Amino acid sequence: MEKVFMKGCEAIAEAAIRAGCRFFAGYPITPQNEIPEYFSRRMPQPDVRGVYLQGESETASAAMLFGAGATGTRSMTSSSSCGISLMSEAIGWMAGSCLPVVICNVVRGGPGIGSIQPAQQDYFQATKASGNGGFRMLVLAPSTVQEAVDMTYRAFDLAQKYMYPVYILCDGFTGAMMEPVVLPEMMSDEAIAAEKKKNESWAVTGRKGAAKGKRIHCGTRHGIPSTLEEKNIADWKMYEQWKIDEVEYECYKTEDAELIITAYGVSARISRSAVDILRNEGYKVGLIRPIKVHPFPEIAYEQLDYDKLRGILCAEMSIPPQFAYDVEAVVRKRTPIATCLRSGGEIIERSAIIDAAKRLYGDK
Amino acid sequence: MEKIYSRPAGLKKMINGYCPGCLHSAAGKLIMSVLEELDLLEKTVMVDGVGCCASNHSYIDIDACGSPHGRPGAVASAIKRCSPETIVVTYQGDGDLASIGLAETMMAANRGDNISVFFINNANYGMTGGQMAPTTLMDMKTSTTPYGRHADEHGYPMHMCEVLNTLTAPSYIARVTCIDAPNMRKARAAVKQAIQHQLDGKGFSMVEFVSNCPTNWGVSPLESLKFIKEKMLPEFPLGEFRNR
């Protein structure tokens, strides 16, 4: 397959289009402006013929995504951090209404307006509280541009499979980086039309193709009568099923490891090269990298041999740490946990990870 | 015998939950009767705002979509752009359309999105117990203006037809009321115009209904009609503001 040299954000947009995304709404915010800009160029082109709509705010853009999702069209929005906070209203509505849409957060520093530089400070927001009401989403966390492409492509299928919003948690580093990537195949017009046709059984498009008086309303699964509690329970069962079917992680050189570095996204990418250097120096170090950060891959940490483990080092670009809390919760004090952190738009350094790992490792 | 009047087919055969005397029923009935007349009941999606307007979806028998509070302008624009063959209408109150959703309303109108907005202005937040709205009249007492609405503290009533009429893109803007039969006929004609503008692809249309809220105004249904005539209509004059 041919490789092309693309910036993370643009590659995400192209991957979405190839996955059949035919509606995008968004609002300018750094560092993800290349996503809406790319969509605005691509959507009108004859091989796409999709809808690009610039919202008057993130609040409106996410509401537009809600409307587009309600028609059964593969749809997406993107934003960054404080913009995602503004979207949390409609994200809750989309989870509340069970709409298959994709949301991409290219994370910057926080809280509030924070900084425009890359960060990983939205971990809790993405995995635990993206809005009110305790809903969860599948959260995919790419660590390379290629992975961002592949995850974006898959995200639409996952959204359609579960009839639920899917969240891509991409740090500003991966969004802004240029790398060679292999792009996936373009979903055919026929396949896109067939899926939209299939979605007419629940989507609001007038009464076309389905029972009259269809409802997209928050608190129900496509208008199927139920109490809100019944809907909450149905969602919960789905979240529990995700823990069986959707857990995704990578173990790198962990077989004989006496120390585990764990990280996601760009921090995992940097940690991976730290592992290689430490291995060359004779340290038995491995990496656990959650590929989806929700559901959290507890099994990856459960299967460690705690008798021979010297500790776990959590590397993330968030102060205070967030990801480390999920690690701590599954490790349950069976081994010492240390952190290597940067925050507010500062990039984590490989040398800092190596130093922290050596401190935790002790004598070889 | 020829049947000349009946419940519009788009309304479910049920008693609605609006308060006695509330003109939401009248507006809903008019909209449904126009959709029926134009044979659009199976081509329309109605986007409901939040508040009393959100009850609407329980009483209608066409496709309906909820919306976060104030966002029907954005939701409806997206639905229409994804499914241009669908007739897309919104049903919103004054808090929804003119306060929390002011940006969404203005921008849908300014983009000229080909949707029809039905705006029920009863000068207060009905569902939540009658708080001050952007359209609350001067000196009017509400549950959050217990001493009346005063200019120095609360500003003045907002006139959404006039505000939207400053924009270039909208194609049809009218203000109507349902307080009596002659006005009902005019209101129905305005609703039909708005839908026809959408059918003709002319862009954004809005019909504002100057409405009542007997429960929160603390008056009888009949007194509320008198209040509309004597107090609301001088502030919110009826008529077509835009028709092209």
Image (cartoon, rainbow, N blue to C red):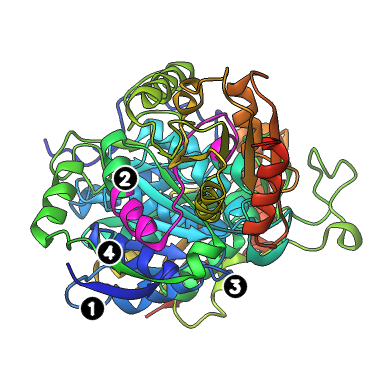
Quadrant where the image shows the N terminus of chain B = top left
Q: Earlier in the sequence, mark 1 or mark 4?
A: 4
Circle 3 or circle 4, nearest the eye: 4
The x and y percentages for residue A229 are 48, 17
Three-letter code for the amino acid on which mark 4 is drawn: Ile
Residue position marked by numbered label 4 in the rendering: A17
Between A143 and B106, the one lying in front of the other is: A143
Highlighted range, magenta: A127-155
Looking at the rendered structure, the secondary structure element under dot 2 is helix
> For the point 73% across and 56% down, which residue is it?
A112
Are marks 1 and 2 in one subunit?
A: no
For residue B162, which numbered disc appears in the image?
Answer: 3
Three-letter code for the amino acid on which mark 3 is drawn: Glu
Chain under label 1? A
Circle 1 or circle 2, nearest the eye: 1
Mark 1 → mark 3, Cα distance in angstroms: 38 Å
Residue position marked by numbered label 1 in the rendering: A45
Circle 2 or circle 4, nearest the eye: 4
Mark 3 → mark 4, Cα distance in angstroms: 41 Å
Which image quarter: residue A181? bottom left
Looking at the rendered structure, the secondary structure element under dot 1 is loop
Mark 1 is surrounded, within 10 Å at the Cα level, by few (under 14), some (14 to 19) or many (20 or more) other residues, namely: few
Mark 3 is surrounded, within 10 Å at the Cα level, by few (under 14), some (14 to 19) or many (20 or more) other residues, namely: some
Q: Is residue B204 visible?
A: no
Picture layout, residue B164 above or below residue A220:
below
Are marks 2 and 3 in one subunit?
A: yes
Mark 1 → mark 2, Cα distance in angstroms: 38 Å
Picture layout, residue A294 above or below residue B30:
above
Chain under label 3? B
Residue position marked by numbered label 2 in the rendering: B32
The x and y percentages for residue A242 are 38, 27
> For the point 49% across and 51% down, which residue is it?
A276
